[in-house]
Amino acid sequence: MNEPSIVNCSFSFYVHINNRYHAYLL
């Protein structure tokens, strides 16, 4: 929990990839 910025970046990247994948499925 010392680097919340890295965690936030990782989560943001994951959400971005998930959105792209979902759009691809649609």
Image (cartoon, rainbow, N blue to C red):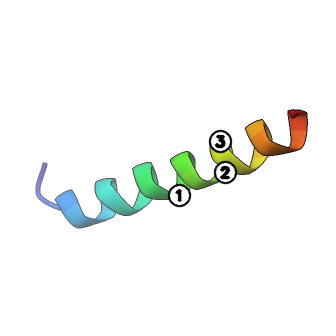
Work out how far the residue at label 1 is from the one at label 3, CA to CA, in angstroms: 9 Å
Cβ atoms at labels 2 and 3 below 8 Å apart: yes
> Looking at this view, is 2 or 12 the one in front?
12
Seen in the image, is 13 located left or right of residue 1?
right
Residue that badge 1 annotates: 13
User: Please, which residue is most extreme toward the front here?
Assistant: 26
Task: Determine whether the residue tagged by mark 2 lies in a helix, strand or loop.
Answer: helix
Label of residue 17 in the image: 2
* Amino acid at circle 2: Ile
Please state the total of marks drawn on the protein image. 3
Outermost residue toward the right?
A: 25
Residue at x 67%, y 51% (from the top left corner) = 17
Disc 2 crowd rating (10 Å Cα; few below 14, some 14-19, many 20+) is few
Q: CA distance from mark 1 to mark 2?
A: 6 Å
Q: Amino acid at mark 3?
A: Asn
Secondary structure under the numbered disc 1 in the rendered image: helix
Disc 1 marks which amino acid?
A: Phe
Q: Decide: marks 1, 2 in contact (CB < 8 A)?
A: yes
Mark 1 nearby-residue class (10 Å; few <14, some 14–19, many ≥20): few
Q: Position of residue 21 (x, y in %)?
A: 78, 42
Q: Residue at x 87, y 34 (%)?
A: 26
State the residue in front, 21 or 13: 21
Of the numbered discs in the image, which one, if any, rests on residue 18? 3
